[in-house]
Amino acid sequence: MSDIKLKITDREGVSHEVDAPTDMNMNLMEVVRSYELAPEGTIGICGGMAMCASCQCYVQSDHQLPEKSDDEEAMLAEAFFVKDNSRLGCQIHITEDLDGLEVELAPEEG
């Protein structure tokens, strides 16, 4: 089992360094939920289907991420607080290539 380190800044501005397993087919939104870095019911509302933007985050590090899917592009087009480095956490799958990834959770909508 190999874990990678992620640095996640929560919506309060607190930075957390967490271990994320690469062998469980998890995505970034699920890692945030498993560490309870956002209040329940405020992240991953659609269950990771790219149908809401509750898991939007800002990628702070220089990692090469997969291209955004059409669904992800469409959701971000309708989301609040979108920046050039916005991604949906549910669309970022945890792989060894992401060791050291740094993200900040976007503010909650509304």
Image (tube, rainbow, N blue to C red):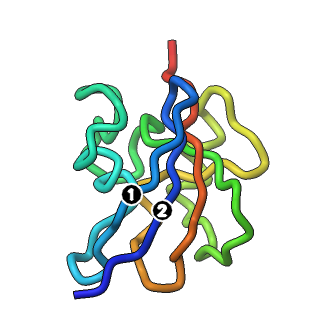
The residue lying at 52 percent from left, 32 percent from top is 14
**Residue at the spot of label 2:** 6
- Number of numbered callouts drawn: 2
Rendered position, 7 above or below 66: above
Dot 2 alpha-carbon crowd within 10 angstroms: few under 14, some 14 to 19, many 20 or more? many
**Residue at the spot of label 1:** 18
The residue lying at 45 percent from left, 85 percent from top is 96
Rendered position, 65 above or below 97: above
Give the label on residue 101, or none: none
Q: Nearer the viewer, residue 65 or 1?
A: 1
x, y percentage for residue 29?
36, 51
Rendered position, 8 above or below 62: above
Left or right of 58? Residue 94 is: left
Q: Nearer the viewer, residue 49 or 85?
A: 85
The residue lying at 59 percent from left, 32 percent from top is 79
Please state, as top left, top right, bottom left or bottom right, where the N terminus lies in the image. bottom left
- Say what amino acid the circle numbered 1 marks: Val
Q: Are marks 2 and 1 in contact (CB under 8 Å)?
A: yes
Q: Nearer the viewer, residue 24 or 99?
A: 99
x, y percentage for residue 94?
40, 73
- Say what amino acid the circle numbered 2 marks: Leu
The residue lying at 40 percent from left, 58 percent from top is 28
Left or right of 11? Residue 45 is: left
Q: Secondary structure at mark 1?
A: strand
State the CA–CA distance, disc 2 to disc 1.
5 Å
Residue projecting furthest to the right: 84
